[in-house]
Amino acid sequence: MGWLKNQFRKVIQWEDQDDTTLVYKYPLEKKQEIMRKSVLVVNPGQKAIFVQEGKIADAFGPGTYELSDIKNIPILTTLYNWKFAWESPYTGDVYFISTRQNINMKWGTTNPVMMRDQDFGMVRVRGFGTYAFSVGTPTKAMDELCGSMGRFTVKNVDDYFRKVITSTLSNVIAESEIPALDLSMHYEELANAAKNRLKDDFANIGIELNALYIENISLPEEVEKMMDKRTSVGVMKGSMQGYAQMESVAAMRDAAKNPGGMSGIGIGLGAGVGMGRMFASEMKDALSGDEAPIKDATSKCPSCGCEVKKGAKFCPECGAKLAVAPTKKFCPNCGKEVSGNSKFCPECGAKL
């Protein structure tokens, strides 16, 4: 009865295809055979592969095939018994491979990516996004990925794909030399560059990378706080007076939270205004690029006490001769610095 059961015509198909399975082995029990006039049904988004003695023999795209009709079967290679019109049963393995896209797959940086930025120096950035892939070459995917596994799922390759994508994107971001403040404007450009690099790596294992997207690239918290502070000042017309106003408001808010309540608001407000003015003054001098004018140095005339510009030889008030401080000079022979009234060099003895 068991032998007779194995002789019945069979319908070979993968009916319960789910979203996570990439490769499914048709459940042929031990000693079970695919007899003549069996029907192979390959649904859309699938391919069927026949394996004979450990080697891939034939592949079938979507459609319905009666295995006794050799003329209507797209044979890639020749199975041993097909030329005899299936007079002998086929006892190999049948695998179904899902060729539809696996979308909304996640990737993300496990560790921060170091990059050199022209505004902030060395910064660490993190990124995450999505990608989509499908089995592009089923026979190659069988050889390189699943082998003889009875079921091969997305989970088996997802971790590996995420690491490959993250590593390549990290290199692309670091090599792009795009300022950290401008990264958000170049997501599409960076994603396309990474996709072009990854295309060949995925194709080598029979996988097609259909899409790659960057959802966000984030900066360290301290850098984001600095950017927020700069933006707050910019909202107040970019003036240091605006910064002082912002600090005053912050001081009022902090004073209200203290145990003393609003009683300490005067101190907080004064401190905020004072700090704001100090920063405003310092930043104004630093940003103006002009040095503060230096007052002309003066001295008093020893005769009449009148203020005389430093360097003058005679008093403009009484005409008295003023002592002139000796100027420094250098020995023309050895270059040693000597005092202004020296007649001979103390280093080499040359006459000055």
Image (tube, rainbow, N blue to C red):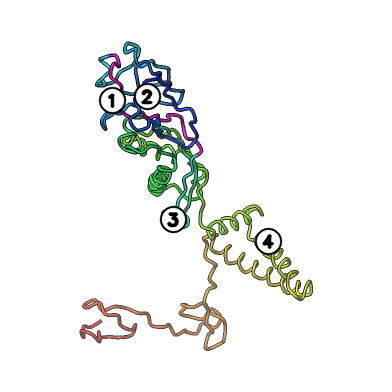
Q: Nearer the viewer, mark 1 or mark 2?
A: 2
- Residue 325 vs residue 172, the one in the foreground: 172
Q: For the residues labelled 3 and 2, say whether their Cβ atoms are less than 8 Å apart.
A: no
Residue 41 colored in magenta in the image? no
Q: Nearer the viewer, mark 2 or mark 4?
A: 2
Span highlighted in magenta in the image: 85-104
Q: CA distance from mark 3 to mark 4?
A: 36 Å
- Residue 230 vs residue 314, the one in the foreground: 230
**Residue identified by numbered label 1:** 57
Q: CA distance from mark 3 to mark 2?
A: 56 Å
Eyeballing the image, is 173 above or below 315?
Answer: above
Which of marks 4 and 2 precedes in the sequence?
2
**Residue identified by numbered label 3:** 111
What amino acid is at disc 1?
Ala
Which of marks 2 and 3 precedes in the sequence?
2
Q: Position of residue 231 (x, y in %)?
A: 60, 54
Q: Is residue 241 left or right of residue 13?
A: right
Q: Residue furthest front?
A: 1
What amino acid is at disc 3?
Asn
Q: Nearer the viewer, mark 3 or mark 4?
A: 3
Q: CA distance from mark 4 to mark 1?
A: 76 Å
Question: Tag 1's secondary structure?
Answer: strand
Which of marks 4 and 3 precedes in the sequence?
3
Q: For the residues labelled 1 and 3, say whether their Cβ atoms are less than 8 Å apart.
A: no
Q: Quadrant of the C terminus?
A: bottom left
Question: Tag 4's secondary structure?
Answer: helix
Which of marks 3 and 1 precedes in the sequence?
1
Q: Which residue appears at 69% of the width and 64% of the height?
A: 250
